[in-house]
Amino acid sequence: MLRIRNLRNQYQKRLIRPLYAQTQATPYAAVLDDTFRADPTTLTLPGSAFLYKGGLVPGTVMVNRGEKVTVATGADAALVPFGLLANFVGGELDDLGDESYVGVWRGPDSVFEILAPGFNDTGLSAAWDASTAGIPVPLVAGADGRLRYQSSQGSRLTVAHLIERPSASRIVVDLKV
């Protein structure tokens, strides 16, 4: 449940929606890495992660570090993506309050709709237009933790394939982790 702290956010939508996930995806119960909470009352968000209204957005790519998860940023390019964050974390739209438990959507071949700003649209339009030949458009974890298209993946692992891009504010992806 969204814990709206300001009335101007009363119409905020969830940014990640499972479309085909009944048997393919699992909302994995995870704990945020200790670096998120220096003390029990304060949430410290990663400096390079994308923030919306002061917090992390659902759809952010997470990596597993032992029993805890953190945001997949440029420094984590070689780590295996664990899944997509299911909650708003911190800021005006915080789902957690003073807890450190989050949901992470996992499951290959599950299909999700992700709304902006839960993904980085840079270069996605051209890649989608060029994909009409049936070549899948791979999406990786960007430097800010959001899904993005990158023409040369380098050491980054594919997190999802783009299935559809109806507009600049909405994509449909096939999760690969």
Image (spheres, rainbow, N blue to C red):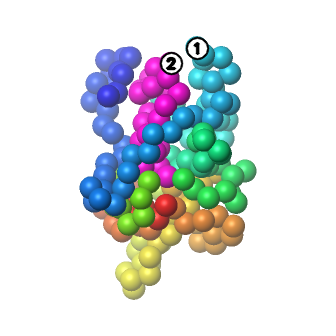
Q: Secondary structure at mark 2?
A: loop
Sequence-earlier tag: 1 or 2: 1
Where is residue 127 drawn, in percent x and y?
Answer: 47, 71
Where is residue 53 drawn, in percent x and y?
Answer: 48, 29
Q: Could you tell me the amino acid type at mark 1?
A: Thr
Q: Relative to the observer, which residue lies in front, 119 or 64?
A: 64
Residue at 72% x, 50% y is 75
Which residue appears farthest toward the top when viewing the image? 41
Residue at 45% x, 40% y is 29
Q: Real-space Cα distance between discs 1 and 2?
A: 6 Å
Residue 3's tag is none
Q: Secondary structure at mark 1?
A: loop
Residue 86 in magenta? yes
Determine whether, in the image, residue 100 is placed left or right of residue 21.
Answer: right
- Mark yes or no: residue 142 visible: yes
Where is residue 117 drawn, in percent x and y?
Answer: 44, 44
Residue at 31% x, 17% y is 7
- Mark yes or no: residue 91 visible: no
Q: Relative to the observer, which residue lies in front, 62 or 27?
A: 27
Residue 98's tag is 2
In the rendered image, the vertical position of residue 39 relative to residue 154, given as above or below: above
Which residue appears farthest toward the bottom when viewing the image? 133
Q: Could you tell me the amino acid type at mark 2?
A: Asp
Residue 41's tag is 1
Residue at 38% x, 17% y is 5
- Residue 80, picture quadrant: bottom right
Determine whether, in the image, residue 87 is placed left or right of residue 164.
Answer: right
Where is residue 3 drawn, in percent x and y?
Answer: 36, 22
The stretch of residues the image draws in magenta is: 83-105
The answer to the question of whether label 1 and label 2 lie on touching residues, with beta carbons closer than 8 A, is yes
Residue 152 in magenta? no
